[in-house]
Image (cartoon, helix red, strand yellow):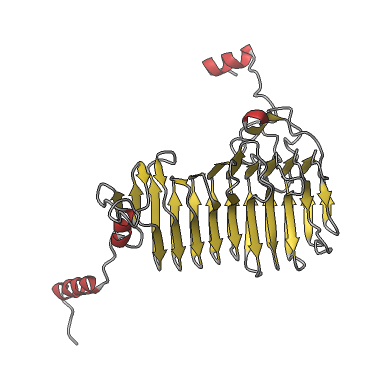
């Protein structure tokens, strides 16, 4: 039997190393510094890359001037790409973006002006930390997506023409819509508008709608479909304008597996507050608990066999609703420490009372405080200063 020499082992290792497939490092492709057009960066991008879009206004090309501007963006069969703007105020896209049959696409830190953004039959999609203005139709649509996430975005439109239909829409999609602010500005009534719509038709489409603020739409959150299974928690819905509208509704065609509606502020809306029953009682697996539902013109509740427990009916005492500040007032708001005791509260600031607040800012750093910090006496200050006991 031959003995392996050190040189033989080394040569074998070298051959094996060069036989391994090459895995390139993730790169950042800069628009327009490296690639004048966004689509050129997309064509050059590989899995794991980031397309960084500098501040500027990116407008669509026209048939008259096809070389000017940008074509609308269509992504198909792409994976593991991040589109990152330089600023959610100054990286402005007037381009529609449509994603098909792709995985792990992140779009962040941009301003979308008068565009539609859609994800279709894909998985692991996220839109975050961006701004939507002058929307015609729907801001973001996710159709047949596994684990879509719409997170920490600002949606703001003027209602002069009532062109907006929906803020964010899930259809046949699982995932979460969380931490968003959806606002219609102006005094006109846009009765058919909906802040958030989720339509689920299979048992796998679990949806979490959490920590969103919705104001001045016609309707707030609508959860519907054949087999909706989800959680609507810690949202604030106020100032809705449709007298026939609903702040939170579950229009369920079949008995849902489970729906939890909790820790929400539903206050001062023209229509109804929380609606779980439409024409038939299919809401026996719906739980409505630890909400503050008050001063809704057409009634606070319309329920059938849903379970109602531990809800309150009080003015949440916003800081300055007239000027768009829907935080609750520190120390005195009745929603402080009134959420579900089983829900987390650790993200709230110090002096939080050890229990989650009701409303969009519950379990966030922006939550109203329970108590003031203790005042340090002179003896304590001296002890800290000189290290005494």
- Which residue is situated farthest in the top direction here? 378
Q: How far from the left and from the top, in percent, is residue 27?
A: 30, 55
Residue at 54 percent of width and 64 percent of height? 145
Q: How far from the left and from the top, in percent, is residue 117?
A: 49, 55
Vertically, is 72 above or below 330? Answer: below
Quadrant the N terminus occupies: bottom left
Residue at 69 percent of width and 63 percent of height? 228
Residue at 26 percent of width and 52 percent of height? 35
Residue 39 as seen in the image, left or right of residue 15: right
Residue 326 as seen in the image, left or right of residue 104: right
Residue at 70 percent of width and 34 percent of height? 353
Vertically, is 33 above or below 348? Answer: below
Q: How far from the left and from the top, in percent, is residue 47?
A: 35, 62
Vertically, is 319 above or below 253? Answer: above
Give 273 or 297, whichever is nearer the viewer.
Answer: 297
**Is residue 26 in view?**
no
């Amino acid at each position: 039997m031959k003995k392996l020499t050190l040189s033989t082992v080394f040569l074998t290792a070298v051959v094996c190393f060069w036989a391994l497939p090459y895995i390139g490092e993730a790169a950042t492709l800069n628009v327009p510094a490296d690639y004048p057009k966004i689509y050129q960066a997309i064509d050059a991008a590989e899995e794991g890359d980031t397309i960084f879009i500098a501040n500027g206004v990116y407008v669509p090309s026209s048939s008259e001037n096809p070389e000017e501007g940008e074509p609308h963006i269509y992504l198909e069969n792409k994976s593991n790409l991040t589109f990152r703007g330089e600023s959610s105020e100054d990286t402005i896209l007037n381009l529609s973006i449509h994603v098909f049959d792709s995985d792990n696409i992140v779009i962040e830190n941009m301003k979308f002006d008068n565009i539609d953004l859609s994800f279709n039959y894909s998985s692991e999609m996220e839109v975050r930390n961006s701004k939507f203005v002058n929307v015609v139709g729907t801001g973001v649509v996710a159709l047949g997506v596994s684990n879509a996430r719409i997170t920490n975005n600002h949606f703001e439109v003027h209602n002069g023409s009532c062109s907006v239909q929906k803020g964010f829409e899930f259809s046949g999609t699982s995932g979460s819509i969380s931490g968003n602010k959806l606002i219609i500005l102006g005094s006109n009534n846009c009765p058919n508008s909906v802040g958030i719509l989720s339509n689920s038709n299979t048992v796998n489409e679990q949806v979490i709608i959490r920590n969103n603020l919705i104001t001045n739409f016609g309707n707030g959150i609508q959860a519907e479909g054949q087999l909706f299974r989800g959680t609507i928690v810690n949202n604030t819905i106020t100032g809705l304008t449709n007298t026939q509208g609903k702040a939170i509704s579950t229009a369920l065609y079949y008995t849902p597996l489970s729906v939890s509606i909790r820790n929400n502020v539903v206050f001062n809306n023209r229509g109804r507050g929380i609606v779980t029953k439409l024409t038939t009682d299919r809401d026996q697996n719906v739980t409505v608990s630890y909400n503050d539902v008050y001063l809704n013109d057409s009634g606070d509740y319309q329920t059938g066999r849903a379970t109602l427990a531990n809800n309150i009916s009080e003015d949440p005492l916003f800081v300055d609703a007239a000027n768009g500040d829907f935080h609750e007032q520190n120390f005195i708001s009745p929603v402080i420490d009134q959420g579900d005791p089983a829900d987390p509260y650790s993200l709230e600031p110090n002096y939080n009372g050890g229990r989650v607040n009701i409303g969009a800012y519950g379990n966030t750093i922006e939550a109203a405080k329970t108590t003031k910090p203790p005042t340090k006496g002179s003896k304590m200050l001296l002890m800290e200063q000189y290290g005494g006991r």
